[in-house]
Amino acid sequence: MTSSTGIRKLAAVMFADIEGYTALFQRNESAAIKQVNDHRKDLEDVTRKYNGQIIQFYGDGSATVYDSVIDAVKCAIELQQLSAIDRIPIRVGIHMGDLLFKDNDIFGDVVNVASRIQSSGIPGSILISKKVADELDNHPDVHIKRIGLFALKNVKEKVELFAINETGLTLPPEIHDHHITLPKKTPYLLIILGILAIAAYFFIKESTKKEIHYAGDGPIFIAPLKDLTNRPEFATLGEEISTSISYALGKTTAPDNIIRFESAMLYFKGDLSAITDDPKLAARMGAKVVVEGIYDLTGIRKDSLSIIARITNPQTKTVVHTFPEVICSTERESDCISQLRSYILGYWSSKDANLFSFTNEKAWKAYYRARKIWSDPDHEEEAKTYLLQAIESDTTFLDAYFLLLDEQNNANQYSHEADTIDLIKRRFTDMDARQENYLRYYEEDLNGRNAEAFKYFIKEYTLDPKDLFINTTGMVLAVEYLNDPVTALKFYGEIGADTLDLNACVYCRSRVSLALQASIDLQDLATAGKIARQLKPYAALPSQISRLINFHMLSGDTTSINELISKASKTSSTWDIQQFYMRIAAQYALVNAKTDLGNYYSEKVISLYGKKLNWKVGRCYKMMGNLAMAEKIYLAEIKTAPNDPWLKGELGVIYALQHKTNLANTVISELESIKAEYDYGVVPYHQGKIKANLGEKAAALKYLSTALDEGMKFQTGNTFHHDPDLIVLKEDPDYLKLIARSRQL
């Protein structure tokens, strides 16, 4: 234990890290956990043996300190030997210097350098700094080998690294850095060359600055290049090129200057063939500048790839600029992509844009494939596999980690998401402001802090408010995270509804559906009616149809409700989809004080299920007031799923409505005992519903407030003002204030 003021001393720092842990964790969670546990046991044993101190475990890695350099090195050697037996691929890095020990942690440049040294190694290796190597001069029994000068992140000058060269250890390849002593006159020569380089830079910058942004500022869209090869192995190359360049260009120019690949995919239903054939269609998305092109095979043996690209104005249909032709071997298509990317980046940002740091092509291909399918629930596992391939190919490719967080969240793999966030925080210690913002958004969202997550989202939104993907995400957050209809409609107004083609743009239907919900929540039925008429011919998703049912229930238009249900039952493969929408209609009837219609649709549901008694039938009996039958059905359902909080919560409400106070309170206690780690407010939400129906308003509001604190969302047809179980609070001013507490406007 150290004092609050800290203690300084000279010490050796060792970082150890398991290579490929994240990928293994996704493939085989139990194997990954065993690997970490085995590694930690080995580390604890050898650290104790060599008088070290474990400062912290970092998931799949660790930091330890030693008073003696030779102890640190011998500990590392034995750790690697044990890891080889256990088949655990670890990298070890050691540095020494002045350390500050404070609050059971260590601080100082030596910590950062040691961590970076470890990251520069390969599985089975032990890398050490020159300071450590010098200390080993008095220990001839430990053999070392110089491997070169390394540029480490956050370290200004290159660092000379050595590897421990003992039996069983792996030696990284040597870097040929021409380790020679420069003549004394060299510094003066470098100064002269530096002055000339600076002068040349300003001359070139002045003479070329008029060419920058020659085609005009965006929005820019990089259309998929057209394939003329007629070879299946090149069929997707055009999209790969466009996404690669869009991604890179987005890093070098303002975000609102680029129409994102995701937005185009969502707008054109995942099929970009139309815009490939006619890039001028990009104007539908608001593009003012389009990069289009073709690629074909060339050469006598057709063993070379030729790419020609140009910039056009889709409004005037004129060619603004044509880039030089790019040619490369078909075996090295990545050379073509890199060269074209440099031309395009150089055109819009600077002539030095070819120096832009980009991931390797293998990692990019995997990332591109994941991006293309990641939102399709039928391809979740495939998308995850591609993302892990991207990370394995480039462990510094941060965007792949972020997309993996999205995938894990969509799949409700919250513990995996937490591990990935922890890994990002440890591996990426020099993120820029936007990357930090993204990470904080994911952290707050994972922890159920909806309002805080929105605050970090809005920072990104203000950079690019008219991007379809980002703007619609803002609408989702406003409606479902904040219950903020005014903010949702503000986002909606950023992109004119009359410019959206709902037939072509499936994603656009979601934003129109969200606008409908926001208008209903504001009781603006005139606006809601206009939006409903726009959405009705295209509505397909349950959320879209449910919101239309809500609107038509408010206006008493049962004919339109029945038409929606009939159409859905003909187009959906879900066997009880008709019952689902009728149950939604019954719920909205009760929420809107239309008891007769609620009974009508509830009876229809019960009739259609026949002898199949499930919780859905039980809910209909509850809505009709047949509480004895509802209780019987829910008790039977809970026997098969005793830890389902939704079933228990509804049973508690049934008890409350029957004035069975003791049983209702028993359910409240049972709910607490089955609360999951990532509950997101489900348990306190149901506890609040039970208390509300027991007539205990103060307790109900306290539970419901906790539910919002823990991440409960405003789900269509399911929670809060969509839930008939909370009708008892519908007009209560304290309840209305509670559910509106996070509104921005």
Image (tube, grey):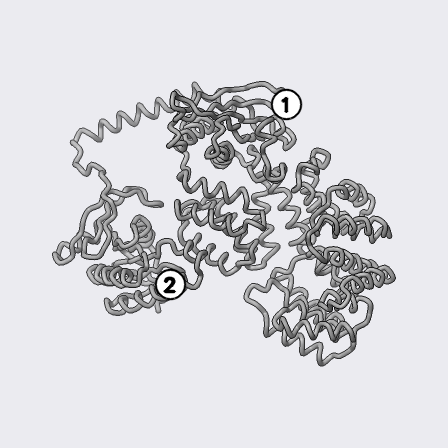
Residue picked out by circle 2: 36
Q: Of residues 357 and 429, which is closer to you in this image? A: 357
Give the SS element for disc 2: helix
Residue 477, given in percent of the width and then of the height, sits at 64, 50
On the image, the x and y values in percent for residue 738 come to 70, 61
- Tell me where residue 312 appears, x and y as whole percent: 56, 22
Q: Residues within 10 Å of mark 1 (few under 14, many from 20)?
A: few
- Residue, disc 1: 315
The kind of secondary structure element at disc 1 is loop
Q: Quadrant of the N terminus?
A: bottom left
In the orientation shown, which residue stands out farthest toward the bottom?
Answer: 662
- CA separation in Å, label 1 and label 2: 58 Å
How dense is the environment of label 2, judged by Cα within 10 Å: few (below 14), some, or many (20 and up)? some
**From the viewer's perspective, is 46 left or right of 288?**
left
Answer with the quarter of the image where residue 676 lies.
bottom right
Residue 246 seen in the figure: no
Q: Quadrant of residue 426?
A: bottom left
Residue at figure coordinates x 39%, y 45% from the top left: 393
Q: Position of residue 663 (x, y in %)?
A: 71, 79
Front-most of 206 and 640?
640
